[in-house]
Image (tube, rainbow, N blue to C red):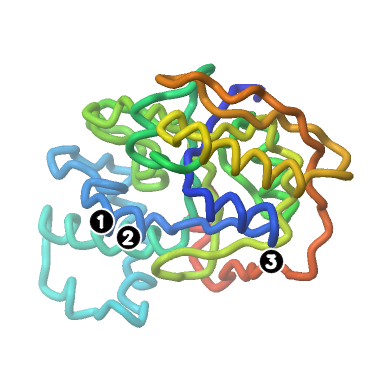
Amino acid sequence: MDEVVWRYMRLETLLLLLHRNTVFLPTLAKLTADEPNEGQLPRRVTPTKDELDFLESVSSWLEAQPTNSPQLTEGLRGDRRVLVLRELWLRELSKRRLIWCWHSSTEESMAQWKIYAQHGVAICSTVLAVTEALYHAVESPILALKARYSEPSAGEDLLARPYSWKRSSFKHESEVRFVLRSQPIESGLTLSDVPTDFIDDIVVSPLCLPSEAFAVIDALTHYFRGKSKTPRIFQSSQGTAPTNALLFPELLKETDSAAVWAPENDIPEQLRHL
């Protein structure tokens, strides 16, 4: 996929990527803590027979998890049991999925600048390039999908991928999500050994003063000097006069750090597939 994607971030996040080849990927549980509707299914969506059978097939595993208890479902019948099992499943799944959210667009978004990087930067790449960079770090399956911004209907298989949709009020985010499996963790995982040659452009926020933008570009000029690839680096022209675009070489791929990666094996087969 050569779809263009953007990641808006603070300057220090970019520096960690450049200097240490590290990227922090939050879990679905972390995203849910920040946005309660994230990764949740509307209760009015009626589970299909396949979903009911699936929940029953993993019920013993769910009850055996350290944070759960058989008493949670003891004596429950019908819809009430289904709702509890579904909540337990979503909770366990959310601790085992890492999600890196990018903005899909052929051009910059002022809304994204104001929300995520008022005085930061944005990096521009493609879906394929980001996927390959992540795979280099984890050597594990990567799922790239476009978020849907509509209410799910009855019968959709959402238990496996509750992170695939968001409410229509978030449509402005236009997200592409990169999803990875992990061992159960609450907040997220810092991946190391992430190659940075997936970056095509580094754009400084249009909300930065020109003098601030020049300082950032000047610092990056020195950092990239002598490297091999040449991502473009410039200040955004959205709302301000742009700082002249400059071309700089790529980042050094070598790093002394190793990716912290230990997907759990003792889990139901259904949980192993993205």
Residue 144 sits above or below residue 243 on the image: below
SS at badge 1: helix
Which mark identifies residue 86?
1
In-front residue for pair 226/184: 226
The x, y position of residue 55, in whole percent, is 32, 57
How dense is the environment of label 1, judged by Cα within 10 Å: few (below 14), some, or many (20 and up)? many
Looking at marks 2 and 3 on the same chain, the residue that comes earlier in the sequence is marked by: 2
Q: Is residue 259 left or right of residue 8?
A: right
Which mark identifies residue 89?
2
* Amino acid, disc 1: Arg
Question: Mark 2 and mark 1 in contact (Cβ < 8 Å)?
Answer: yes
Q: At 53% across and 55% down in the image, what residue appears?
A: 12
Q: Is residue 207 left or right of residue 212?
A: left
Which mark identifies residue 98?
none
Residue 164 sits above or below residue 108 on the image: below
Distance between mark 3 and mark 1 Cα atoms? 32 Å
Quarter of image, res 117: top left
* Amino acid, disc 2: Trp
* Amino acid, disc 3: Ala
Q: At 68% across and 37% down in the image, what residue appears?
A: 199
SS at badge 2: helix
Q: Which mark's residue is nearer the viewer, 3 or 1?
A: 3
Residue bearing the label numbered 3:
259
SS at badge 3: loop
Residue 243 sits above or below residue 42 on the image: above
How dense is the environment of label 3, judged by Cα within 10 Å: few (below 14), some, or many (20 and up)? some
In-front residue for pair 31/213: 213
Q: Which mark's residue is nearer the viewer, 2 or 3?
A: 3
Distance between mark 1 and mark 2 Cα atoms? 5 Å
